[in-house]
Image (cartoon, rainbow, N blue to C red):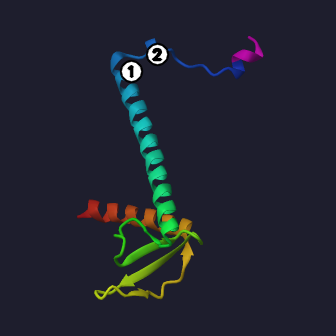
């Protein structure tokens, strides 16, 4: 036996799988492709929205916040997140939350989604 036989990975040919397994493998591949395309699409949309708000000179509302309403906003020039309170009069008031990096916001948002999922499962 040569060294090549140890280095070369051995994959089963597609025909060695049952018809049911091939259907499951195709469905899994399709789901992965869908998830990848969805992420790519979201990233392009987010970048476009960020560019438009930056050109307009305004902060961009983040997930869970409607533009012009109380919530989290991204400052495109500093890539920092702020929480703004918008009064009924339309006045914007700083919340007193410290500014923090967008990456930290994404981590926090992910943790909150997981927590919401666990709370929803418990109910």
* Closer to us: 88 or 4: 88
Name above or below for residue 48 compared with residue 119: above
* Closer to us: 106 or 113: 106
Picture quadrant where residue 102 is located: bottom right
As measured in the structure, the alpha-carbon distance from the residue carrying label 1 to the one carrying label 2 is 7 Å
- Which range is magenta? 1-5
* 115 displayed left or right of 77: left
Q: Check contact, mark 1 vs mark 2: CB within 8 A.
A: yes
Mark sitting earlier along the chain (1/2)? 2
Q: Which mark is residue 22?
A: 1
The residue under label 2 is: 14
> Residue 60: where, in percent of width, then height?
45, 69
* 1 displayed left or right of 107: right
The image quadrant where one finds the C terminus is: bottom left
Secondary structure of the residue carrying numbered label 2:
helix
Picture quadrant where residue 80 is located: bottom right
Name above or below for residue 76 compared with residue 33: below
Q: Residue furthest left?
A: 123
Q: Residue at x 37, y 16 (%)?
A: 18
| Membership of 96 in magenta stretch | no
Q: Could you tell me what secondary structure mostly forms the magenta stretch?
A: helix
Name above or below for residue 34 compared with residue 104: above
* 10 displayed left or right of 92: right
* Closer to us: 62 or 14: 62
Q: Which mark is residue 34?
A: none
Q: Residue at x 38, y 63 (%)?
A: 113
> Residue 62: where, in percent of width, then height?
42, 67
Crowding near the residue tagged with mark 2, few <14, some 14–19, many ≥20 C-alpha atoms within 10 Å = few
Q: Residue at x 38, y 76 (%)?
A: 71
* 15 displayed left or right of 24: right
């Amino acid at each position: 036996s040569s060294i090549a036989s140890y280095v070369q990975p051995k994959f089963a040919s597609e025909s060695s799988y049952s018809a049911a397994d091939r259907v499951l493998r195709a469905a899994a591949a399709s789901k992965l492709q869908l998830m990848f395309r969805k992420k790519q699409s979201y990233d392009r949309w987010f970048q476009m929205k960020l560019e438009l708000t930056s050109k307009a000179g305004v902060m961009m509302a983040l997930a869970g916040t409607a533009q012009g309403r109380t919530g989290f906003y991204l400052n495109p020039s500093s890539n920092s997140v702020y929480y703004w309170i918008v009064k009924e009069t339309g006045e914007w008031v700083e919340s007193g939350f410290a500014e923090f990096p967008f990456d930290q916001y994404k981590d926090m948002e992910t943790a909150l989604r997981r927590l919401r999922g666990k709370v929803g499962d418990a109910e």
